[in-house]
Image (cartoon, coloured by chain):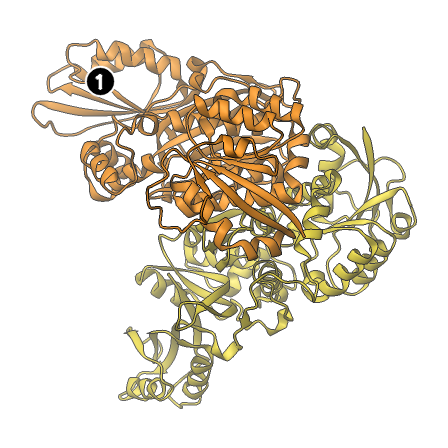
Chain colours: A yellow, B orange
Amino acid sequence: MKTIKVGLVGFGTIGTGVAKLLLLEKERIALRTGCDVQLVKIADLDTTRDRGIQLPEGMLTADYHEILNDPEISLVVQLVGGTGIERTIMLEMINAGKNIVTANKALLATFGEEIFEAARKNGVSVAFEAAVGGGIPIIAAISESLAANEIESIHAILNGTCNFILSNMEENGSDYAETLKEAQRLGFAEANPAMDVEGSDTAQKLAILSHIAFGTRLDWKDIPKDGIETVSGIDFRFASMLGYSIKLLAIANRTKGANGVADKLELSVCPTLVKKGLPIAAVSGAYNAVSVVGDAVEHSFYYGKGAGELPTASAVVADVMDTVVGRTKITFDTLNLWNPERKTGENIEIAQAADVTGHYYLRVMVEDRVGVVAELTQILASAGISISSCVQVAAEDNMVPLIIMTHETTEGAVLNAIQAMNGLECVKSETVRMRIYG
Amino acid sequence: MKTIKVGLVGFGTIGTGVAKLLLLEKERIALRTGCDVQLVKIADLDTTRDRGIQLPEGMLTADYHEILNDPEISLVVQLVGGTGIERTIMLEMINAGKNIVTANKALLATFGEEIFEAARKNGVSVAFEAAVGGGIPIIAAISESLAANEIESIHAILNGTCNFILSNMEENGSDYAETLKEAQRLGFAEANPAMDVEGSDTAQKLAILSHIAFGTRLDWKDIPKDGIETVSGIDFRFASMLGYSIKLLAIANRTKGANGVADKLELSVCPTLVKKGLPIAAVSGAYNAVSVVGDAVEHSFYYGKGAGELPTASAVVADVMDTVVGRTKITFDTLNLWNPERKTGENIEIAQAADVTGHYYLRVMVEDRVGVVAELTQILASAGISISSCVQVAAEDNMVPLIIMTHETTEGAVLNAIQAMNGLECVKSETVRMRIYG
């Protein structure tokens, strides 16, 4: 039986799960790979915290060079987040000829080309199923199982923190601030939740998915994104009344030109009203889900835990097993990801942020006086935005929430209209905007 | 660029979809595999019917030997159903050294060992993603993406015909016979729907999934199964009242022994009351879905079109692409499926049909007279079955539907009790039994 020695960099939540699976399920892994997969070294700056797992003497070190410089370690599981020293570690490991399994989406979304170029040069592979969707095998699904398809759209819940907060607000009628606190108390949100709640984490994952599905090459920061901080209880009440749930959706949507041929690719991350009855509308708590439409497979949907020790470790260890048996290398060579020369047959242009189309939900908090609706609708008309429905409810504290649902329009037109509306004297707070799906 | 010549046996619905993808999306497939995949021959007894696709002169033949005897054809897509001549064709193709991609679940569920033994002997691979769940990549998910897991349970909707009928009955309040006719008219049910509505097709697919997930070796006919013919409108009304939908579920469930260690594997195919709110309860129409719980990944869920020309062809062509690039061969060698020597680390015993545990829904149609409920509940008590709830509604035509929900009991106890109840003079028609999930 072939022996593969594995090093693990990063002994946090996922790292602990990976160590548990590799050490405690060694026999299972051996039976299913035909290899003796040996975790031999774990590097983490914190070598003292109790992670609830007993490691053999000498396995844990604070110095990743012990992995880097061990020529017997041919596979490195890289689970430290961030794009600073983590980038250096990644490149050093690759240049030392080690195959990589990683969950670091920020690194791939930011330095994908550099990392994959180094891997190609060194004849090693990089696997990253755990970088998007935790335990959901969405990377394998899009890049292998749906390989015969032209992907038409992806609508995905990719951040468990946001989904936990939004579904708790929906179920309990609580407001954003108190729900965030509750999420932090339960460990579903970081002390500094900015990367999650502002949509950056989701945008990085969307950048990775759209690179695989559509061959896009873009800076994830160029994906227009809105976070969930402005969503309030009142939005859930209106959404529910109109038959919608609210989710932070990553959307990649191929628009069709006049001749029905794929035209542009629209990317966005935005709180979205999702029609109840769609599978993705029912996703609650810290779950993730991805809805993919392909030209052959039609609608397919994938759902699972998007984070957590063992669910994410399940994806990491699957990548380890794929690497060990040789499947990863084939996929890596065939897909040719993050290669400027990569050809997918797509050649699709990414729509400018301002040109991204959609139906929108707007909540404008206005003064309770005559003529307000006329002023607002005049602005929308000037922006060329057609209203599909408009709801106004009784005033509270002299403030009236006015809900406007639009027909199809563009992100640019909506942002311009919002700017104009926010400038009106009768508009009392920032107008909230969401997309509508379904 | 490497050239791979492909032969296709079976030019029905899926075969037509496969031919369309291989012929019309040649460039896409070449870019994603690095190979020139050439469909060179299609064999089908019907060489005249118009399938809506223009084939090159000479491609279609009535004689599969033209594929068998062409040494340049290294990959055969086998899409004829059945287990007679289809078994012969399969073995002949394998013995001629051709790699196989198939959607024939009956053949695998019945002659898996013989076919895989022949493939191992000839150094070729057999891929069969399309045999279960149509466009859902459930074979890849369980055998690759979830490979680090011990699978704890599978609950699946695997037959689009049954799900179409059940969800239409639920939505329209129509009865079984008229809904079946409608399904036949729309092409969602065969003229002879027995294999589908009696649960055989689902049992074959469950046998394949449980072989992959648990290493089980059993005759699919030994899986206890009930069809959907006895489900009536009244059941949907009761189910809805109690917060359930009704689905034909394939269930594989690992029970835990006293020490919490996996004890036995319970397999069944049965109309099931599924708690609303679970993702699988929301699956309607001709869709399939699979809910998988693994010890690491926890709950994961996969959903897509379970049948149809292009959705199933999507899975077939993904297998072709996997075979062409070499991934299939690795998976085939590593998984070692349908090999009596195969070891999965599971060694789990299959529960006898009578010992399969569950909560049950019983609908007993009784005479409207004094003492009937006492007689029935006496039978259940004698069988050791504890009642969790009991609902009786007003009589219609002197018949009273009595609904009994049980606490956990066994299939054997329930069948015995039903037999005893059906023998009572006050019981006016066969008692209907379903399982309860969630």
Residue B303 can be seen in this image = no
For the residue pair B127 and B274, the one nearer the viewer reads as B127
Residue A316 horizontal side relative to residue A147, left or right: right
Residue A357 can be seen in this image = yes
Could you say which quadrant of the image residue B432 lies in? top left
For the residue pair B187 and B59, the one nearer the viewer reads as B59
- Where the C terminus of chain A falls, by quadrant? bottom left
For the residue pair A78 and A425, the one nearer the viewer reads as A78
Residue plotted at (10% across, 17% down): B369
| Label 1 sits on residue | B430
Count of residue discs:
1
Amino acid type, callout 1:
Glu
The location of residue B323, given as percent across then percent down, is 61, 40
For the residue pair A19 and B218, the one nearer the viewer reads as B218
The location of residue B385, given as percent across then percent down, is 35, 16
Which residue is at the far front? B58
In terms of secondary structure, where does tag 1 sit? loop
Q: Around disc 1, counting alpha carbons within 10 Å, would you say few (fewer than 14), some (14 to 19), or many (20 or more)?
A: some
Chain letter behind tag 1: B
Residue A78 horizontal side relative to residue B156, left or right: right
- Where the N terminus of chain A falls, by quadrant? top right
